Amino acid sequence: MEKRSIRAEDLFNLKSVTDPQYSPDGKKCVFVQTEMLEKNNDYASNIYIIDMEKGGQPSQWTFGENRNQSPRWSPDGTKLAFVSNRSGKNQVFVLDAAGGESKQVTDFKNGASGPLWSPDGKRIACSVSLKPDEDLFDKTEEKKEDKKLEPFVAEEMKYKSDAAGFWDGKYRQIVIVNVEDGEAELVAKGEADYHLQGWSPDGKNLLLSADETPERDFSFKSDLWLMDIKTGDKNIITNGKGYFGNAVFSPDGKYLGYTGHEREFENATLSQIYIRDMETGNVQCITENMDILVGDAVAADFQQGAYSPSLIWGEDSVSFYFLASDQGNTVLYFANLNGEVYPALLDQQYVYGYTLDRKNQRIVAAISNPVLPGELFQLEVTTGEMKQLTSVNEKFLESITLSQPEQISFQASDGTPLHGWIMKPSGYEDGKKYPLILEVHGGPHAMYANSYFNEFQVLAAEGYGVLYINPRGSHGYGQQFVNAVRGDYGGGDYQDVMDAVDYVLETYDFIDKERLGVTGGSYGGFMTNWIVGHTDRFKAAVTQRSISNWISFYGVSDIGYYFTEWQIKADLSDLETLWKHSPLAYVDKINTPLLILHSEKDYRCPIEQAEQLFIALKRQGKETKFIRFPESNHELSRSGKPNLRLSRLQSIVDWFNEYL
C-alpha cells in the first residue's frame, strides 16, 4: 500500500488508550479507549479488557457513544466500578466481572467521580460537588423555562476557573456508597475541597487531601488528613507548609507514600516522594538526592483522559514504583525503604500511565513516542522483556508517513546546556531547502518529550522542518533550571530559543533561513509575541491562547493575581516591571505577519489578551488576523470540540503556507 502524509483531518482517525488497571490476581487488565465521533462532534470512551493469561486481543466491555472512564477493580476482582455519563451526568456504575449489565450505584444531583473501593469490597468512596446547604439526595432541578437571568455576585478573587467557569459555591465533598443497596453517606463535608486519596487497609479511615485555609483566595497548600469514618474526626498528617497529595498506603498499612513539596520555588518547585512510618511518624524523602520532578510534566496534544498514579506499592510493602520527568522522557523507577532507587523502564519515550501486577512482578504501561500516538505494553520486571498489548492505531499508521525527530544537545550563549528535537519534513529530499517552524511549549513549567505530537507531524507533512526545545523554565533538567525563568520572562528563556535557531541553522543545511516561522500556546504564546516584538528573523508567526499584557492579566486571569506575583515577581504596585515583560509594550516593533488564535471562554489567558494585541497591531497597520473559537477554553488544542480542534490546526497550516 502506498503511504501518504498525515493531514489535519486525520485527527479523527486516531484513538487514545489510557488508564490501564490490572485485576488483583493479575489475570486481566482493563483500559479506556477514546475516539472522536465526527458526526456527533464529540468524544466516546469505552472500557476494554485483556485476558493476560490467554494473551489475546483486547475485547470491548462497555459500548455506546458516551464517556465511560476511571475503571477500578474491587479488591477480590469480581467487580469493576467505573464512571459514565450515560445517564446525563457522571455517575458511578458497577460491572460484574462474570458478565451482565452494569448497575448504577450513584444517582446524585450533581454527579459523582473518582470511585475507590473499600478493602472489604462492600462500599465505594467517591467525590461529589455540593454547596454547604445542598442536600446530596435532592433531585429537584430547575426546568429550563423556570430559569431566569440572575446577576453573578463575586466576593472573592477565586470566583472563576478555566475549566469550570464561574464558581457556583460548590465544594468537593466525599461520599461513601453501599454497593448492594445504594445507600450513601456524606462523610467529608464543609467549606473546603476534600480530595479522596484512599482507604486505610483496615477500612476504618479515609485518606484525604485538603486545604482548610478559611480564605479560599490564598489557598495555595494542600495537606494530607486521616479521617475516622465512624466519628468524622480528622488528623493532619503533613506539616501545613506545602502541597502534598497522591497518597497511598502500603498493603500492610505500616507506611504511607505520597508526593509533594513545601513551595520553596512556588509552582516551579520539584515534587518529591515521601514515605511516612505510620507507627513512629518518621518521614523519609526518598528522592531528595535526585534532581528530578516526580510525576508527569509532558506537554502533548493527543492523549485523552491520561491517568498516572504517583506511586504503586509492591506486595512486600517495602518496595514501590514511581514515575518521574527527566531529560525529555518519563522514567518509571523502582525504589525501596532502604533508599535504593533505579530505573525499571527507561527509554526514549513517554510513559503516561502504568499499573502493577504485584504477584507476578509485571507492569502494563501506556507508552507513546514521537511516531507512536500511544499503546499499551507489558513489562516483565525481572527480565526486562517488553510485549505490545494493543494496536489501536496500527492500521492507520500503516497508511501514512510520519517524521522521526532527531534529538539535539547544544549550549546556550551563556553556557547553559540545552536539549531539544528537530524534525525534517515528511518526504525530505537531500539538497532541497525547507522552511522551519519553531514551537514553544506552555507552562512554562512543562516539558517537551519523546512523545507523539500531532501538530508537529501535521506541519512536517506540509513540508516544514519543526524545531522544539526545552528552554530554561522547563521541567526535566533539575530545580535550578526550572526556576531560572521566574522573574526573567523574555530574558534567558528568549535567548535559549533563539540560540536553538542559530544552532540548527549552523548544523543542518536543509533549512532556508529566509523562511522561519514560530508558534506556541499559553506561555508559548507569550514567547511567540515576545519573539516577534524583538526580532524580524521570522517571516510568519501564530500566537495561541497567549499573554500580551501582564498588567491586565493580573486581574482578568483565573490565576492572575498569584501567578503574576510568582512568575513575574511583581504586582500592581510595580507597573513598570509588569509592562517591561509585556509583549504589548513592543507592538510597534512587530513586523512579522501574526495570526492570533484564542478561545472565547479561556479564563486562564482570557481573550482580552488577544483583543488588545489585535487592535494594537491593526491600529498600526500591521499584518494580522484574529480567529476566535466559540464555547472553548484554554484546553482547546487538547480536548476541545473536535471540529474546532481541526479548524485550529488547519488555520495554523494555512497561515504558514501563505507566508512561508
Image: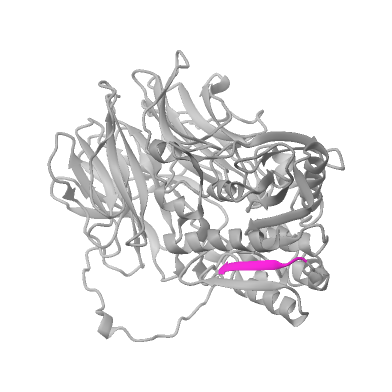
Along the horizontal axis of the image, is 240 left or right of 257?
Answer: right
Q: Nearer the viewer, residue 27 or 254?
A: 27
Number of numbered callouts drawn:
0
The structure residue drawn at horizontal position 62% and vertical position 73%, both measured from the top left corner, is 626
Q: How far from the left and from the top, in percent, is residue 577?
A: 81, 66
In the image, farthest residue toward the top: 383
Along the horizontal axis of the image, is 535 left or right of 475?
Answer: right
Q: Quadrant of the C terminus?
A: bottom right
Q: Nearer the viewer, residue 60 or 358?
A: 60
Q: How far from the left and from the top, in percent, is residue 255?
A: 44, 29
Q: Quadrant of residue 218?
A: bottom right
Per the rendered image, the range of residues in magenta is 592-598
- Residue 278 appearing in the image: no
Along the horizontal axis of the image, is 18 left or right of 288?
Answer: left
Q: How far from the left and from the top, in percent, is residue 23?
A: 28, 30
Our reading of the magenta stretch's main secondary structure is strand
Residue 594 part of the magenta-drawn span: yes
